[in-house]
Amino acid sequence: MGQRPLRPLVGILSSWREPGEIPLPLHATAATYVAAVRSFAGAETVLIPGSEDPDQANSLLPRLDGIVLTGGAANIQPHLFGQEEEPESGVRDPGRDATAIALTRAALEGGVPLLGICRGIQEVNVALGGSLHQHLKDVPGRFDHRRPRDKPFEEQIVPRHDISILPGGMLHELAGTTETRINSLHGQGIDRLGAGLQVEATAPDGTVEAVTLPGALGWMLAVQWHAEVQPDNYALHASIFRSFGTACAAFLERRQG
């Protein structure tokens, strides 16, 4: 029998969680990210815990063929984008912040495929010098993008509003349309755009829903909604992960060569 082809290895960033019955630090990520990467991107996965050690990103990156910046409950520390802490901002995850920003910058410098989802698009923006609205619902003209917690979880993750997609952009190529409907589970959003980023999609209230980096050395797309949710039911979600997987496979081939 021939040797099984080597699959790309994708690092999936995890988040700190409060200890449960066992009082130990815990890092976790939703299984939906792992399933989407394995089934639709055709890659193996490894979870990356957040760490404030600046050397972690540099030590991990040479082993990876792609990175997924996941969603997360904690908001990015506002001092990282030049703002003071606003009230009711919830928990923080400094280790995740440090790891995400370092990995983003290193991946872009090295041409490693990078997919950002929900918190991930915000991390990409901050890593490139952009800023965030800490409470999007309080910004004049914007609506509340947070998930409706009073409804069953299955109803919280269904598409809730439309987006307009930039004609001719990466997302347009993946979606095959200039309009589609997406889920919405975030409280923060992009304010000032990071250096070099191009807006690929916006919500009806002007909120940035997707960005790319034209001229990047590698594949890069970040979206504000949860594209890992049910890619078998939503064609755009599947298309995003397949395109990411193709880029990861090509990176692996170049790295081996």
Image: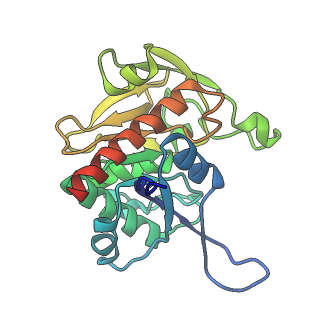
Picture residue at 33% right of the left edge, 14% below the top = 167
Task: Tell me if residue 18 comes above or below residue 181 in the rendering.
Answer: below
Residue visible at 43% across and 15% down in the picture: 176
Most foreground residue, 217 or 154: 217
Left or right? Give the position of 113 relative to 18: left
Q: Residue at x 27, y 56 (%)?
A: 107
In the rendered view, tell whether residue 246 sits above or below residue 203: below
Q: Position of residue 137 (x, y in %)?
A: 56, 38
Horizontally, residue 1 falls left or right of residue 173, namely right
Using the rendered image of the protein, determine whether residue 191 is visible from the camera's viewpoint.
Answer: no
x and y percentages locating residue 25 in the rendered image:
61, 81
Colour scheme of the picture:
rainbow
The residue positioned 64% from the left and 55% from the top of the image is: 31
Q: Quadrant of the C terminus?
A: bottom left
Look at the image and tell me whether residue 16 can be seen: yes
The front one of 66 and 209 is: 66
Identify the image quadrant of residue 193. Answer: top left
Residue extending farthest to the front is 1
Q: How many marks?
A: 0
Query: Does residue 146 appear left or right of residue 125 in this picture?
Result: right
In the depicted view, which residue is nearer to us: 68 or 127? 68
As drawn, 203 above or below 192: above
Viewer-closest of 242 and 5? 5
Image location of residue 15, percent across then percent down? 55, 65
| Residue 234 x/y as whole percent | 61, 27
